[in-house]
Image (cartoon, grey):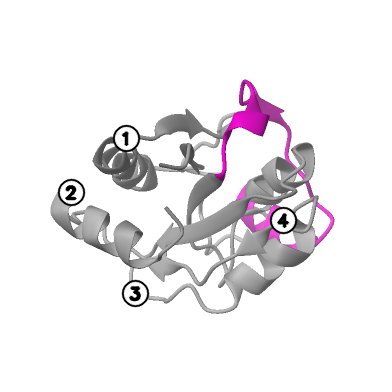
Amino acid sequence: MKKVLVTCFSATGVTKGVAQALAEAEGGDFFEILPETPYTSADLDWNNKTSRSTVEMQDPNCRPAITGAVENMDQYEVIFLGFPLWWGREPSIVDTFLEAYDFSGKVIVPFCTSGGSGIGFTGDRIARIAKGNPTVVNGNRLGGTTSMADLKTWAEGLDVL
């Protein structure tokens, strides 16, 4: 069995809940991508053109600082990477994570939580940004109330474990 890491950035807790359930379903380790400066509700106001999240997402080179680090990243073969979908893609803080480690020889499985939008071409972006040219499989949008059984069925159906 391959060593699994389930990691996520979660702005409001929805993605974190899904990621923790997935980690439990797959017997994987869990790591939360935490911003050095936590996001406030004002920061997350996507209707405000000057809110932090809007400004970050308008700058493709933005890399918000992260606190903490994955210990022994080398041990993991499969990384499930979760995030809320912002402006049709992963938040910039996820890009910070992707550039912080060498993903050579690893498989990354992206998943997002969203009010309705699908994951789209986010996997292609992740493949371009992640260091080490990992294999990035087609991801999926998962609902905040996805059952552990459905998470397990989805993960095992990917044929990466």
Residue 107 in view, yes or no: yes
**What label does residue 116 carry, if any?**
3
**x and y, in percent, of residue 40 in the image:** 51, 36
Q: Are marks 4 and 1 in contact (CB under 8 Å)?
A: no
Q: Bin the neighbour count of mark 4 within 10 Å (Cα to Cα): few under 14, some 14-19, many 20 and up.
A: some
- For the N terminus, the quadrant is top left
Label 1 sits on a secondary structure element that is: loop
- Residue at point 54% right, 68% down? 137
Q: Bin the neighbour count of mark 1 within 10 Å (Cα to Cα): few under 14, some 14-19, many 20 and up.
A: few
Q: Are marks 4 and 2 in contact (CB under 8 Å)?
A: no
Quarter of the figure with residue 70: top right
Relative to residue 19, is residue 94 drawn left or right?
A: right
Q: Earlier in the sequence, mark 4 or mark 1?
A: 1
Which one is in front in this view, the residue at disc 2 or the one at disc 1?
1
Amino acid type, callout 4 = Val
Q: Earlier in the sequence, mark 2 or mark 3?
A: 3
Find the distance from the CA under tag 4 to the CA under tag 1: 37 Å
Find the distance from the CA under tag 4 to the CA under tag 2: 35 Å
Which one is in front in this view, the residue at disc 2 or the one at disc 3?
2
Q: Is residue 69 above or below residue 133?
A: above
Q: Which residue is mark 4?
A: 55
Amino acid type, callout 3 = Gly
Q: Is residue 54 magenta?
A: yes
Q: Are marks 2 and 3 in contact (CB under 8 Å)?
A: no
Q: Earlier in the sequence, mark 3 or mark 1?
A: 1
Which one is in front in this view, the residue at disc 4 or the one at disc 2?
2
**x and y, in percent, of residue 106 in the image:** 64, 50
Q: Nearer the viewer, residue 119 or 149?
A: 149
Find the distance from the CA under tag 3 to the CA under tag 4: 23 Å
